[in-house]
Amino acid sequence: MLLRDARLLSSTDDHEGDLRVADGLIDAVGDLSPRSDERIVDLDGRTLMPGLVDAHVHFSLSGETSVESVVELSDAELALVEARNARKTLESGVTGTRVMAARGVDLDLQRAVTRGDVPGPRMVVNDRSITITGGHGHHLGREIDGPVDARKAVREQVKRGAEFIKFMTTGGVTTPGTDPDRVALTDDELDALVDETHRHGLHAATHVHGADGAKAAALAGVDTIEHGTFLDDEAIELLVSEDVTLVPTLSAPHYIVRNVEWATADSARKTDHIYEAHLESFARAVDAGVRIAGGTDAGTPFNYHGSNAAEITFMIEHGLSPRGALAAMTETAAETVGLDGCGTLEPGTDADLLVVAGDPLEESTTLNDPEAVLFGGDLVSGFLPDGPTSR
Ligand SMILES: [Zn+2]
């Protein structure tokens, strides 16, 4: 298939041209002559860009006000919920994800998607989050106590096929009885978790709100910090010097604040306290040159799957350039989570593409509703300009 007369937009490039898809891959980019036997789609100047990559989603959660209803689901029910959320995500234009998993179910989902049993984006998956006993996310996670248990938890997950490890350095907004400001894991536990993760060649992601947690995690050698709500100057300097990527998840507090009358009293109270601080931390981190990978925390209260592209708008509103925000949610996110070959228009990579009306650099909200989503060269949502028969 030849996608002709497009504006080819990636995080590093922006020019007119054509793009050929063959065998699910981007075959060539440039000024291309049609082959006699190929389908030609005239894009008429529409933007053709890489599918989005979301570095932080929860397919186990669907925007409920609290996780309690999710905890009651059987694993089979949870898998069906996850399959629905994965499909919504893909159809919205997110073709790559890092999935913060629950009860190991997401590894099964990943295999089902890879086999083609259910539609879904490319996924980098852990097994479940690691947390202290009673800590943030304990309902769907693995509770640990002490460095020996920490190593064992990592080894269990590697044995089951986890592709990265996530742990909760501080308390969280959505778990009653935990404090987002306080460091939950001890230094011994953090060191053991990071060391064991890296021994297996995986990357370590950690949930952090408070500045002390960010510093402890950065010094322990984590690869990504999720949220980073209360970063002070020292924490930001450490993120830069220790080469830690920040996944800000601005969507998460945004939707709780916007729907505060329906939120649980506990998460409303905590979010009220954190929202402004979170935006300010993000802006300062951007100014200081911290590497940003886009992630939405989709699935958290009122943060519905399929609205992921709004994170780009939020990042632009709070300090990133439009091109920087686009990079954060394409190439940088892909590199950060290990989805090699995603998030670019390089020949030889998977043909995960969006056709978008208008200019996403001028008007990022156009990404909320792409005209067409191609995944591995197949149309999975919307229409190409030559008509609806194309699927
Ligand atoms: Zn999360």
Image (cartoon, grey):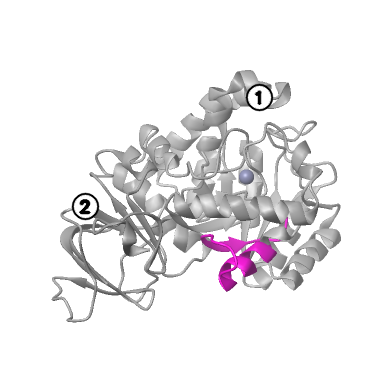
Q: Is residue 287 above or below residue 161?
A: above
The residues colored magenta run 107-129
In screen coordinates, is 46 left or right of 278? left
Q: Quadrant of residue 212?
A: top right
On-image quarter of the N terminus? bottom left
| Quadrant of ligand 1 in image | top right
Q: Nearer the viewer, residue 240 or 43?
A: 43
Q: Residue at x 64, y 46 (%)?
A: 207
- 111 part of magenta stretch: yes
Q: Amino acid at mark 2?
A: Arg
Query: Which residue corresponds to mark 1?
Result: 263
Q: Is residue 266 above or below residue 2?
A: above
Q: Residue at x 76, y 72 (%)?
A: 159
Q: Nearer the viewer, residue 137 or 66?
A: 66
On-image quarter of the C terminus? bottom left
Q: Residue at x 40, y 46 (%)?
A: 289
Q: Is residue 132 above or below residue 25?
A: above
Percent position (x, y) of residue 387? 27, 57
Percent position (x, y) of residue 209? 63, 37
Percent position (x, y) of residue 145? 86, 52
Q: Is residue 258 above or below residue 16?
A: above
Q: Nearer the viewer, residue 171 or 306?
A: 306
Query: Which residue corresponds to mark 2?
Result: 46
Extreme-bottom residue of the structure: 36
Q: Quadrant of residue 203?
A: bottom right
Q: Amino acid at mark 1?
A: Ala
Task: Give me the C-alpha separation between circle 1 and circle 2.
Answer: 40 Å
- Tell me whether the residue at label 1 lies in contact with that at label 2, contact meaning CB atoms closer than 8 angstroms: no
Please tell me which of labels 1 and 2 falls first in the chain.
2
Looking at the image, can residue 376 be seen? yes
Percent position (x, y) of residue 107? 68, 64
